[in-house]
């Protein structure tokens, strides 16, 4: 897999906001990344592309890739940008997705998790979830929990795969359309049964996608 996981840095914020805008509805109250990045009670992880064959920005004419640029170079730049997303120009890693985690009591609470639309279905959401569960172990927490829209079956399938159970409903939780949220929480992660499940899932993940660097 040509993706790796690491902690988010301040220079990632603009790309993370792009991914957040793409993934969530306009009514979504965005995260205050700059403030929360410095909090010891939060952790943000980003998945980034490791084999990006994007041309270095310094070799890309500023107008290349603009809608009116029909040159081969312009079409290529547009193609690369549409695959990797982002407006470019700031250097650094090209991000594929992110997860925000709050450490609350004995729980790790996932506040947001999202993958660039063009890169979904390739294991990146799963990688972000593996990083989250590992962070919960590292913090000595007992459970991982989150809310998901009742209609968000794709996300629910991912959480279900990692042993999250439906434990309740928050009525009218989402401000934009007053949709209910389903609360999903893992079993206690320090039990032998969960450890075994998580370790089996990780093994299958690495078999399927290859080795991935995970720094939480
Ligand atoms: C939810 C989300 C993060 C999943 O990321 P992803 O990288 O596409 O998911 P992965 O490729 O890692 O898939 C992991 C698992 O998710 C589920 N899944 C992913 N895509 C799916 C699809 N199209 N249909 C059904 N299940 C799907 C499957 O269980 C899959 O495991 P499998 O490959 O063994 O079947 C991504 O769809 C996303 O960013 N959605 C928009 C934001 C969002 O809804 N966030 C969740 C808020 S609660």
Image (cartoon, rainbow, N blue to C red):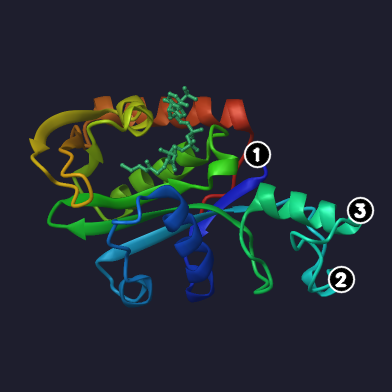
Front residue (pair 142, 15): 15
Q: Label 3 to label 2, Cα distance in Å?
A: 15 Å
Looking at marks 2 and 1 on the same chain, the residue that comes earlier in the sequence is marked by 1
Q: Is residue 37 above or below residue 183?
A: below
Find residue 161 and report its image quarter.
top left
Dot label at residue 1:
1
Q: Label 1 to label 3, Cα distance in Å?
A: 29 Å
- Camera-side mark, 2 or 1: 2
Q: As drawn, is 137 to the left or to the right of 61?
A: left
**Element under disc 1:** loop
Looking at marks 1 and 3 on the same chain, the residue that comes earlier in the sequence is marked by 1
- Is residue 216 in sight in this rendering? no
- Is residue 213 in sight in this rendering? yes
Please give the name of the residue rendered at 83% of the width and 61% of the height, measured from the top-left corner. 69
- Residue at image mark 3: 72
Q: Residue furthest right?
A: 72
Q: Residue furthest front?
A: 68
Q: As drawn, is 215 to the left or to the right of 141?
A: right
- Residue at image mark 2: 59
Q: Is mark 2 within 8 Å of ligand 1?
A: no
Q: Position of residue 37 (x, y in %)?
A: 36, 72
Q: Position of residue 53 (x, y in %)?
A: 80, 53
Q: Quadrant of the N terminus?
A: top right
Q: Label 2 to label 1, Cα distance in Å?
A: 27 Å
**Element under disc 3:** helix
């Amino acid at each position: 897999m040509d993706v790796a996981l690491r902690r988010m840095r301040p220079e990632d914020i603009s790309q993370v906001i792009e991914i957040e805008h793409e993934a969530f509805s306009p009514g979504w109250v965005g995260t205050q990344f700059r403030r929360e990045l410095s909090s010891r009670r939060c952790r943000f992880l980003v998945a980034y592309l490791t084999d990006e064959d994007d041309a270095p920005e310094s070799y890309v004419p500023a107008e290349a890739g603009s809608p009116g640029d029909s040159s081969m170079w312009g079409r290529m730049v547009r193609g690369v940008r549409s695959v990797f997303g982002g407006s470019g120009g700031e250097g650094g890693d090209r991000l594929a997705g992110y997860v925000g985690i709050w450490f609350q009591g004995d729980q790790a609470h996932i506040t947001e998790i999202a993958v660039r639309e063009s890169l979904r279905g390739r294991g990146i959401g799963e990688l972000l979830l593996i990083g989250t569960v590992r962070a919960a172990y590292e913090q000595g927490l007992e459970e991982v929990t989150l809310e998901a829209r009742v209609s968000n079956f794709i996300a629910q399938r991912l959480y279900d795969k990692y042993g999250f159970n439906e434990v309740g409903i928050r009525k009218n939780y989402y401000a934009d359309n007053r949709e209910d949220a389903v609360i999903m929480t893992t079993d206690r992660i320090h039990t032998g049964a969960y450890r075994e499940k998580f370790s089996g899932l990780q093994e299958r993940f690495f078999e399927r996608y290859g080795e991935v660097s995970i720094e939480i």
